[in-house]
Amino acid sequence: MDRHLGQELAALARMTVPELRTRYEELFGEPTWVRHKAWLSKRIAWRLQALAEGDLSERARRRAAELANDADLRLLPPRSAKTAAAPPPAALILPGQRDARLPPPGAILTRTYKGQTLQVKVLRDGFEFAGAIYPSLSAVAKAITGSHCNGYLFFRVGPQGARP
């Protein structure tokens, strides 16, 4: 590598993003929307070295083309967030269905938390705690702790409930 190329590569680290974008446009002949400094620096360094030392050999270009032809290419673009598929129906609980982990309505869930014994009554359509009705165990747990947590784990309901 000649001295001039080494100095130019070292100067890339001191350049700002707008300066790198300008240099990119000079070297590649087209503007870039990228504002990632590390990516711009690497791409410009590659181009400077390719211009100074020579690009890929014809043999390397043919091999790259062969590999690209053999590669499994994506034929459809990835789904956007707007068209993402809904969760599978098995994960949904229909209205009127109860979660199998819950005890029957009228049962009392008891949990000791920070020295207090907490009691939550299971209702047909929710949970009663401290005179208020909550739609889920997680809502009750959030009211108690002040932060979101899984209500089933907090009250030790279900298969995980075996722990002391």
Image (cartoon, rainbow, N blue to C red):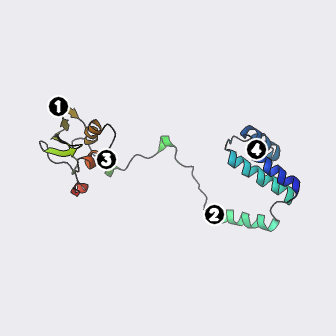
Label 3 CA crowd tier, 10 Å (few <14, some 14–19, many 20+): few
**Residue closest to the far left:** 106
Label 4 CA crowd tier, 10 Å (few <14, some 14–19, many 20+): few
Q: Report whether 15 appears left or right of 139.
A: right
**Residue on which disc 1 sits:** 131
Q: Residue 3: in sight, yes or no? A: yes
Badge 2 or badge 3: first in the primary sequence: 2
User: In the structure shown, which secondary structural element does the residue marked by tag 4 occupy?
Assistant: loop
Mark 1 or 2, which is nearer the eye?
1
**Residue on which disc 4 sits:** 14
Q: Nearer the viewer, residue 140 or 106?
A: 140
**Residue on which disc 2 sits:** 71
> Which image quarter is the C terminus in?
bottom left
Q: Residue at x 80, y 62 (%)?
A: 56
Q: Amino acid at mark 2?
A: Ala
Q: Quadrant of residue 67?
A: bottom right
Badge 1 or badge 3: first in the primary sequence: 3
> Which image quarter is the N terminus in?
bottom right
Q: Report whether 125 appears left or right of 45.
A: left
Mark 4 or 3, which is nearer the eye?
4
User: In the structure shown, which secondary structural element does the residue marked by tag 2 occupy?
Assistant: loop
**Residue on which disc 3 sits:** 92
Query: Disc 1 and disc 3: Cα gap in Å?
Result: 29 Å
User: In the structure shown, which secondary structural element does the residue marked by tag 1 occupy?
Assistant: loop
Mark 4 or 2, which is nearer the eye?
4
Q: Quadrant of residue 17?
A: top right
Query: Disc 4 and disc 3: Cα gap in Å?
Result: 54 Å
Q: Amino acid at mark 4?
A: Arg
Badge 1 or badge 2: first in the primary sequence: 2
Q: Residue at x 23, y 44 (%)?
A: 113
